[in-house]
Amino acid sequence: MFYNNSLGRWAHFGGLSPVKQSHFTADESAMTFSSPPRRRGIYAFQARLVDLFMIGSTYEVGHVSNKSFRLRDDNGTVLDFDDHLCERLGPKGWRISWVSPQLRALLKKKKIKQSQLQRDDYGLITVLRKPRVFSYTGLLWHHLLEAVDPEAVLEQRGKWVLSSFRSWRDAFIRQRHVDLQELHTTLGADLGSDVLTQLSKDPWKGSGMKMCTDHLEVFIERPK
């Protein structure tokens, strides 16, 4: 399995110092699925399984996380999305189908991938910065409650459980098999046998249909 050599590698947008979590609550009954389990720490994803939806305020340039910036040409002019890009709705969601020659040259010059581009609330092109990838094999909070060995759970808060990296790794591998089975049985049964060839062989990656990865986020109190 391609994850074996990368399970200790994590992706995070921003620095690695613990961040004060403004949405932390001591009232567990008020916690949502992703409410931080501790007052300070950082969210992260497996380096090869980053869920852009879950990182929050991804394309808001003014967000404190500083995850994105507006794309400017050589004259310092911000670029309008509709002047340089065209989107179309396909079977896998919205995809960019046309890029202007000017923008294509600018992306090549600045070494920016097309997948990093997005339209902000003002109709301008923003660029998602690349996440920071780091190594960590210490204690971590995660959502794999159903897959982790109950004896390995050190603490639980809301939908989070705290365990060692090794226990999380074992749970991660079990969860992969669970998600793969659900993808090929439940989803396949709902959509019909004719779509089975479109399902990814991996539940979370690949060009075919796959499962969401929001349950794979982790929270690390002391990443370094």
Image (cartoon, helix red, strand yellow):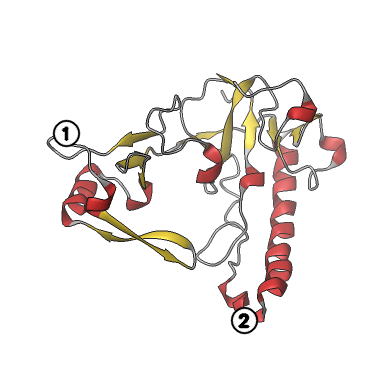
Q: Position of residue 172 (x, y in %)?
A: 70, 48
Looking at numbered disc 1 in the image, what kind of residue is underneath it?
Answer: Gly
Q: Give SS at disc 2.
A: helix
**162 left or right of 94 in image:** right
> What is the number of callouts on the image?
2
Q: Quadrant of the C terminus?
A: top right
- Decide which of 18, 136 is in the foreground and name it: 18
Q: Position of residue 79 (x, y in %)?
A: 22, 42
Q: Are marks 1 and 2 in contact (CB under 8 Å)?
A: no
What residue occupies the far right of the structure in this picture? 151
Name the residue located 35 percent from the left edge and 45 percent from the top edge: 119
- Decide which of 212, 144 is in the foreground and name it: 212
| Quarter location, residue 204 | bottom right
Q: Quadrant of the N terminus?
A: bottom right
Q: Position of residue 194 (x, y in %)?
A: 62, 81
- Label 2 sits on residue: 194
Q: Position of residue 161 (x, y in %)?
A: 76, 34
Q: Pick whichever of labels 1 and 2 is earlier in the sequence.
A: 1
**118 left or right of 104 in image:** right
Question: Is residue 139 at least partly visible in the picture?
Answer: yes
Name the residue located 59 percent from the left edge and 61 percent from the top edge: 210
- Label 1 sits on residue: 76
**63 left or right of 7 in image:** left
| Quarter location, residue 60 | top left
Name the residue located 19 percent from the left edge and 47 percent from the top edge: 106
